[in-house]
Image: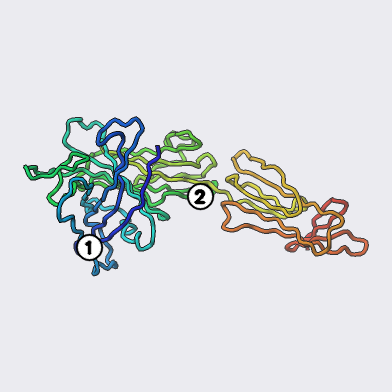
Amino acid sequence: TKPIFLRTVLLLVSSADGVADVVLTCTLVEEGGGLGGMGGGHFTRTPATLILRDVAVGPDESLEELTPFVPPSIPDPDLLLFEAEVSSPEIPNANVLLHADCNEQEVMCELSSYSPRGLEENSDRVFFMVSLSVDEVDFSTALILETLKVEKDESTLMQSKLGLPLSQSGTLLTDLIFVVFTHIKSVSAPLRSDVLLNCGFKQQDTPLAQEVGIEWRLQHRGKGVSACVMQGLAMRTYTVVGEGNASLTLTTLKVGDEGTYICTVSLGPFHSQQVIQLRIIRKFHSDLNPQPLCHSSKYYPLDSHVSNYQGSLSSHRQHGDGTFTLSSHIAVPPTTVPGTKIICKVSHTALEEPLFVSVVVEPPEPGISSLFAVSGYYFTVQHNIVALHKQ
């Protein structure tokens, strides 16, 4: 079941010099009947609010007209208010969140219960996963939050849905312990080029674990394969440069490298991931040949469109490297009026705009067959056999 993201309403409020609080309208997604319930594939979605405290703000940001976040005057145990202090570790590129509302960009925020691997079932530690992304912006971040211990007494309110103690202001107090992020949600790269798939992570000053585990997997045409055992391993290397860089470099891209890449970072019992779409493109060559009029060769992917307004198309031909070739032939009847323009239009995802090739029918000179003048070339038609002459 695919997760459903609701529109997020963003509000920026100031709390102190150099930092700000960001309030996000989110969705709590649960499997089954609640926290830790048995689901059988059924998901429930409940409105929630996430308050990110102490988000770092650049020196050029103005906070003069902003006011601090004020919780409800009367705590409501039915409300889901998650409060997280995010100064350490910081959320990379958090300025995107600060400006999303003004830029009319949609922010997707989803919360869900998270269970670290190997954690004892009777442990009183509770964790949540937060997925954040911004529409039309290369910003995607996964946060792991741990609830803070609240000293309970007879006046302590319990959140009605989750059964967790609330702070005096009615919020679920949490601490950010782990961040996995990417600055590139999707990328297009030319065939046989190199590409860097960005993936990074941050943790608290006190490390969650001494060893960092990094795994990249490729999902392509319904099949999954570990990137570290793909053919050509010697050409694919992790570029872990210091703590926090889990990026993957792919060299000499092939058609088979296209697909969905999943970066998973593990720190002890904790793990999180980011997903990056890689598209392979090959800008083809559209040549003027005597026959055919348009010859588009060595392009990828297949979704090209060639329109010849007075001719016919060949079938796509696939090469050993996965690229394709397509030709368009002209057909000029003897009754064609001089001055007629024959146009070939080529469209493809690798092109910023369509390419056009035009051929103009010239009146025949005495004793010479029809001529076509095209970009410095003459095409001569003699009994439906086209010969090329350079101008």
Look at the image and name its color scheme.
Answer: rainbow
Which callout, 2 or 1, points to the residue nearer the camera?
Answer: 1
Residue 295 x, y percent position in the rendering: 70, 50
Residue 172's place in the image compared with 221, above or below, is below
Q: Which mark is residue 220?
A: none
- Name the residue tied to disc 1: 14
Residue 239 x, y percent position in the rendering: 38, 45
Q: How many numbered tags mark residues here?
A: 2
- Name the residue tied to disc 2: 189
Q: Is residue 243 visible?
A: no
Q: Is residue 332 visible?
A: yes
The quadrant of the rendering that contains the N terminus is top left
| Amino acid of disc 2 | Ala
Q: Residues within 10 Å of mark 2 (few under 14, many from 20)?
A: some
Q: Choose top left, top right, bottom left or bottom right for residue 302.
A: top right
Identify the mark nearer the N-term, 2 or 1. Answer: 1
Looking at the image, which residue is at 54% across and 46% down? Answer: 192
The kind of secondary structure element at disc 1 is strand
The kind of secondary structure element at disc 2 is strand
Q: Nearer the viewer, residue 138 or 208?
A: 138
Residue 382 relative to residue 288: left or right: right
| Amino acid of disc 1 | Ser
Residue 325 relative to residue 163: left or right: right
